[in-house]
Image (spheres, grey):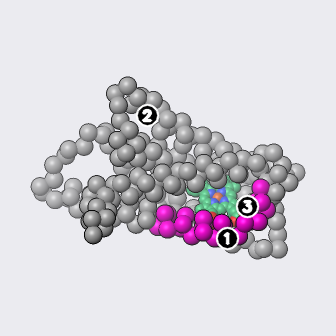
């Protein structure tokens, strides 16, 4: 089938990475907006979480789709990394990269695996938290632990590095590339990940530093 042939071709795999990356980026935008309500009050955050859970069917379909998108992004990403390594170890390897081999691009699999480790800890801590306690209380309790919050902040730094290359690379795959806008694209690829770091990292710091003691 043409569709399967396309997805297993090298441009198809790049396209799959870019599309799943875009969906994950959109998820992060909604997640950061929802979590930013923590800075308002525990009641506002709790009512946001309650509102979300008042539509169980939507939550189940959304969570399951998100899991599939994450799995596709991770598996295809690891496959591409393995494939690239085989090619660059080959004695017929030719360097055709136009892109400079930045720190962010060469560490993509490692920052990606760190984010995966974070997600496992995060989902066990929050999504599978005991149902008898309020989610706002769980967030405060977990992030008030210095080492737990520190691990979160390190994961957000890894996320920022990962996104700074991933966002740029996604736009290249989609053909968003024009000499007039390239400087703007490069700046956006840094500003958007830093914005996530500011909000997500700010939440972890808020509890870890004791600023959120009355939350
Ligand atoms: C301090 C920052 C963060 C806080 C406070 C936070 C909070 C939460 C909470 C409370 C939930 C459970 C929602 C519920 O079931 O009621 C959740 C789920 C989740 N979070 Fe986060 N989160 C943070 C950062 C992140 C980041 C950076 C990512 C991705 C890299 C992420 C990915 C997820 C995923 C995938 C789920 C499961 C969503 C689902 O089941 O549909 N979170 N988060």
Can see residue 42?
no
Task: From the image, tell me which residue sits under label 3.
Answer: 52
Distance from disc 3 to disc 1, alpha carbons, whole Å, reads 11 Å
Q: Where is residue 17 in the image (x, y as percent from the top left)?
A: 39, 56
| Quarter location, residue 99 | top left
Marked residue nearer the N-terminal end (3 or 2)? 3
Q: Does the residue labelled 3 lie within 8 Å of ligand 1?
A: yes
Residue farthest to the top, as pictured: 180
Towards the viewer: 77 or 16: 16
- Alpha carbon distance from label 3 to label 2: 35 Å
Name the front one of labels 3 and 1. 1
Mark identifier at residue 57: 1
Above or below: residue 79 compared with residue 48: below
Q: Can you tell me whether the CB of the residue at mark 1 lies under 8 Å from the nearest atom of ligand 1?
A: no
Where's residue 88, x and y in %?
A: 21, 55
Residue for badge 2 = 186
Q: Are the residues tagged 3 and 1 within 8 Å (C-beta)?
A: no
């Amino acid at each position: 089938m043409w569709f399967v042939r396309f997805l297993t071709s090298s441009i198809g795999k790049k396209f799959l990475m870019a599309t799943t990356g875009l969906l994950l980026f959109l998820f992060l935008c909604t997640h950061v907006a929802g979590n930013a309500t923590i800075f308002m009050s525990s009641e506002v955050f709790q009512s946001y979480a309650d509102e979300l859970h008042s539509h169980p069917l939507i939550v189940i379909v959304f969570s399951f789709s998100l899991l599939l998108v994450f799995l596709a992004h991770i598996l295809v990403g690891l496959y591409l990394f393995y494939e690239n390594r085989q090619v660059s170890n080959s004695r017929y390897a030719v360097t055709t990269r136009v892109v400079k081999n930045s720190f962010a691009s060469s560490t993509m699999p490692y920052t990606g695996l760190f984010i995966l480790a974070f997600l496992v800890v995060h989902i066990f801590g929050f999504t599978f938290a005991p149902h008898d306690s309020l989610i706002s209380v769980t967030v405060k309790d977990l992030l008030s632990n210095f080492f737990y919050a520190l691990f979160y902040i390190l994961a957000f730094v890894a996320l920022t590095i990962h996104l700074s290359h991933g966002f740029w690379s996604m736009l290249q795959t989609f053909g968003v590339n024009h000499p007039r806008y390239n400087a703007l694209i490069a700046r956006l690829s840094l500003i958007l990940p830093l914005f996530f770091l500011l909000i997500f990292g700010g939440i972890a710091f808020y509890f870890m530093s004791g600023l959120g003691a009355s939350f």
